[in-house]
């Protein structure tokens, strides 16, 4: 009988037949979902010989939400994700006009999904722009709720912008040109610490060696600099038995310890390319995290297949998602690569503790890429490859799970 996943103070409790809500998504969403769900079901069946099975529950958002429920993001979709704790989604169209910023941003806000989790590594066979893409095996923890992305912006020339500019001049003596648009960058202690705590916990659980705080605190001292300071404070207070700092480590990390260090954001981009083996888990703020996620995915040639999840580790809510958009120009043509959604599913299985299913999915994807029978995005870049459809690529993955 299908049951709910329960979050307890001791962690996640996953029944053998969990109900997992899914949002198919817009554009290429339906075809990549159709491919992905076959891969998921096959991996679970193979890993657990029928003892475990997911009961998929369709919930609606985006264009289908509007068609079926007359709303872009129905309240019952948000409550289902809360009720069942873990969900997965395809890409959603951002409605143009109408006041809604983005369905994804709204969903993250409503569920307070404060971590954007992005593992990045190279899969053999994928053409990459760097000499040694295999040195990249990193996990990004990007803060999802604060920073310049909090939506606190006023348009140049508006009454509100003029009032704020005048208030800032009167109270703080700040001279801001009157034709400026103005935005705020809130970075809080609670918001920073819960993100960095999640990154450190992840490093402990997954036996990672380094957690790097990436910031621009040399310039933005009270926002990004504070993030860095709160990070070290948290590491000292809550993780003192497992961490070590650069000065103590003196070039080598003692067995069983995690090195906590920090790098200024611009230098980090250089380090990502020149010394990737010295980067492991990354904890950073919203804007830096946005840039780093795409730059790292590009470094391994995998921007189209990068997986992701948005999580609230405190309450246990997690929504895994394809990181690309709806690709409207190829929608319905069977051309889309389903790998981002499938690898997001792998991430979801790891979160559920179903590591055997996750491993089968990864094995299947790796072998499917190596076979060079790939969707058109890879076909264009891979020499001597054969073009297959979205569904055929999923078949390859399934046939390669051993
Ligand atoms: P996009 O990711 O949809 O497309 C960028 C390019 O990548 C296009 O050439 C597209 O054909 C290609 N592409 C994307 N996914 C692919 C896949 N799986 N296989 C093969 N090729 C793929 O980005 P966009 O064009 O900027 O946005 C289109 C729509 O998607 C917009 O409405 C945007 O708001 C939305 N969007 C949603 C999400 C999300 O739901 N997470 C993320 C980004 C954009």
Image (cartoon, rainbow, N blue to C red):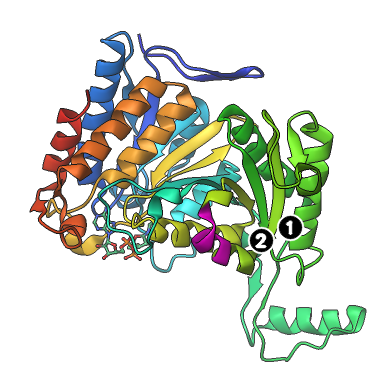
- In the figure, is residue 90 to the left or right of 165? left
Q: Work out whether 372 lies above or below 39.
A: below
Q: Answer above or below: position of 235 versus 2.
A: below
Report the residue marked by disc 2: 147
Q: Quadrant of the C terminus?
A: top left
Q: Is residue 323 visible?
A: no
Quarter holding ligand 1:
bottom left
User: Which structural element holds mark 1?
Assistant: loop
Q: Which residues are magenta?
A: 270-276
Residue 366: x and y in percent read 26, 39
Within 10 Å of the Cα at label 2, are there few (<14), some (14-19), or many (20+) other Cα atoms? many
Would you say the magenta stretch is mainly helix, strand or loop? helix
Which residue is farthest front? 251
Instruction: Please state if 7 lies on the left or on the right of 193 as rendered.
Output: left
How many numbered callouts? Answer: 2
In the rendered image, which quarter is residue 90 located in?
A: top left
Under tag 2, what secondary structure? Answer: helix
Residue at 64% across, 17% down:
10
Residue 146 drawn above or below residue 17: below
Q: Is residue 211 left or right of residue 375?
A: right
Closer-to-camera residue (110/328)? 328
Q: Residue at x 23, y 52 (%)?
A: 28
- Which residue is denoted by mark 1 in the rendering? 187
């Amino acid at each position: 009988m299908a049951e709910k996943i329960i979050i307890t103070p001791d962690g996640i409790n996953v029944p053998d037949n969990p109900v997992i809500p899914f949002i198919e998504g817009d554009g290429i969403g339906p075809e990549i979902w159709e491919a992905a769900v076959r891969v998921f079901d096959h991996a679970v069946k193979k890993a657990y010989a029928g003892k475990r099975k997911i009961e998929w529950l369709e919930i609606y958002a985006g264009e289908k939400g509007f068609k079926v429920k007359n709303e872009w993001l129905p309240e019952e979709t948000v409550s289902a994700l809360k009720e069942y704790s873990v969900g997965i989604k395809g890409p959603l169209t951002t409605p143009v006009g109408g006041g809604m910023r983005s369905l994804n941003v709204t969903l993250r806000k409503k569920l307070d999904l404060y971590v954007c989790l992005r593992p990045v590594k190279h899969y053999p066979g994928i053409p990459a722009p760097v000499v040694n893409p295999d040195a990249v095996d990193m996990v990004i923890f990007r803060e999802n709720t604060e920073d310049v992305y909090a939506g606190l912006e006023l348009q140049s020339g508006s009454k509100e912008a003029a009032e704020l500019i005048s208030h800032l001049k009167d109270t703080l003596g700040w001279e801001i040109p009157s034709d400026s648009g103005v935005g705020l960058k809130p970075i809080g202690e609670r918001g920073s610490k819960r993100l960095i705590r999640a990154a450190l916990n992840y490093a402990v659980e997954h036996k990672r060696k380094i957690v790097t705080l990436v910031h621009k605190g040399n310039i933005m001292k009270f926002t990004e600099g504070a993030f860095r300071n709160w990070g070290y404070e948290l590491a000292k207070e809550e993780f003192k038995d497992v961490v070590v700092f650069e000065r103590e480590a003196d070039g080598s990390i003692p067995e069983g310890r995690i090195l906590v260090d920090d790098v200024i954001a611009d230098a980090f981009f250089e380090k990502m390319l020149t010394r990737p083996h010295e980067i492991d888990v990354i904890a950073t703020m919203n804007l830096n995290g946005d840039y780093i996620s795409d730059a790292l995915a590009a470094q391994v040639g995998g921007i189209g297949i990068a997986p992701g999840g948005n999580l609230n580790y405190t309450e246990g809510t997690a929504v895994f998602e394809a990181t690309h958009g709806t690709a409207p120009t190829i929608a319905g043509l069977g051309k889309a690569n389903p790998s981002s959604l499938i690898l997001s599913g792998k991430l979801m299985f790891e979160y559920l503790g179903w590591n055997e299913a996750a491993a089968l999915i990864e094995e299947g994807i790796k072998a499917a890429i190596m076979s060079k029978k790939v969707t058109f995005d890879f076909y264009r870049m891979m020499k001597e490859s054969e073009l297959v459809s979205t569904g055929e690529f999923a078949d390859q993955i399934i046939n390669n799970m051993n």
